[in-house]
Amino acid sequence: MRSYLRIKSPWAQLGLFFGLVGVSILLTSFLSAFILLARGASISQLSNMDFSDPKIIGAMKVVQAISTITIFFVPALVFALITFQFNQLFFLGAHKPEKNSYYLLALLIMFASFPFVSWLGDLNQQIPLAKWMVDMENEASKQMEAFLKGNSAKDIVINLLIVAALPAICEEFCFRGVLQRIMIHIFRNPWAGIIVTAMLFSAFHMQFEGFFPRMFLGIVLGALFWYSGSLWVNIVAHFFYNGAQVIAVMYYPKMVNENPSLPWLLVIASGIIVFALLWLIRKKSNSTFARIYEFEELNERNQFIA
């Protein structure tokens, strides 16, 4: 049988992927500045955006959508085209799960996680941060509040597309489809790879007051992908979580900066339900390291056979 990998070393794969992401960030920075200038922003506004100007917000939404695609999806796609000999998207996980029940379980997990994630957010906000971190956090909050203003049907659809759907698709291909696959290969341990990927997933967003909640969600999404083997399960779960937040913030803007106070029993129940559902998915799954990482040749045990 022929090998399905052009690049077999996971360390070489990691170097290639980080290089692609770095180039994408650089090119996206220039493209974003060009778009903002073309849409009427001045040079001075590039470093100090006026979030009250509807034209600036409209331009920034375009930039946000393009940036999500170019920074996350494009490097993942180019990585797949370079690394895999054939069926590139399939090897990233773009195929049906072995069991359709994973979709329902993934949605239940994300729904049940809200109280526990909110508690992690409160915990995270108790940690003192450097001034530059606080400034970045405040700037990100102002931008998100400006993005999500308005509650017409058109506003909801646009915000769901830009803030929920595109990140769900592009980030899952990037972090779970590529980075987690590489990390598990490097550590030769699924949970080590899942946790390290979740840390990088959270750190990359550069929102430090939300580091722990986003890392927890990264771990949950990583486990969903490992046990289901399908990025579509992850994309549905990720979109549901993002979409629920978008709609909540549009009607309750304070949620951008404040986590609702919740009873301890609800937080504890939330954590127990999430871990119980993950355990159930694990029991249903056939994923093992040997089954997935037979990287020399395709064989009858390899989960990624098309």
Image: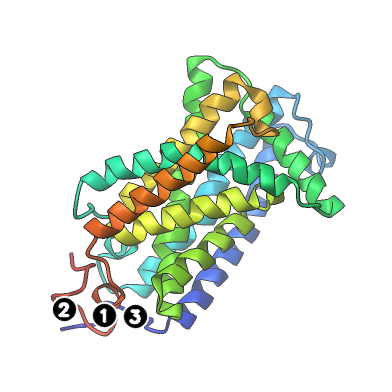
Residue 165 seen in this snapshot: no
How many tags in the picture? 3
Horizontal and vertical percent for residue 191? 43, 68
Identify the residue shown where x is 33% and y is 55%.
279
Q: Which of marks 2 and 1 is nearer the N terminus?
A: 1
| Residues at marks 3 and 2, CA–CA distance in whole angstroms | 17 Å
Q: Which of marks 3 and 2 is nearer the N terminus?
A: 3
**Which label belongs to residue 6?**
3
- Height in image: 133 above or below 88? above
| Residues at marks 1 and 3, CA–CA distance in whole angstroms | 14 Å
- Height in image: 147 above or below 306? above
Q: Name the residue under label 1.
A: 294
- Which amino acid type is marked by label 3? Arg
Identify the residue shown where x is 45% and y is 79%.
186
- Which amino acid type is marked by label 2? Asn
- Asked which secondary structure carries label 3, the reply is loop
Horizontal and vertical percent for residue 225? 35, 57
Asked whether the beta carbons under mark 2 and mark 1 sit within 8 Å of each other, the answer is yes
Does 140 sit left or right of 82 as displayed? right
Disc 3 crowd, CA 10 A, few/some/many (<14, 14-19, 20+): some
**Which label belongs to residue 299?**
2
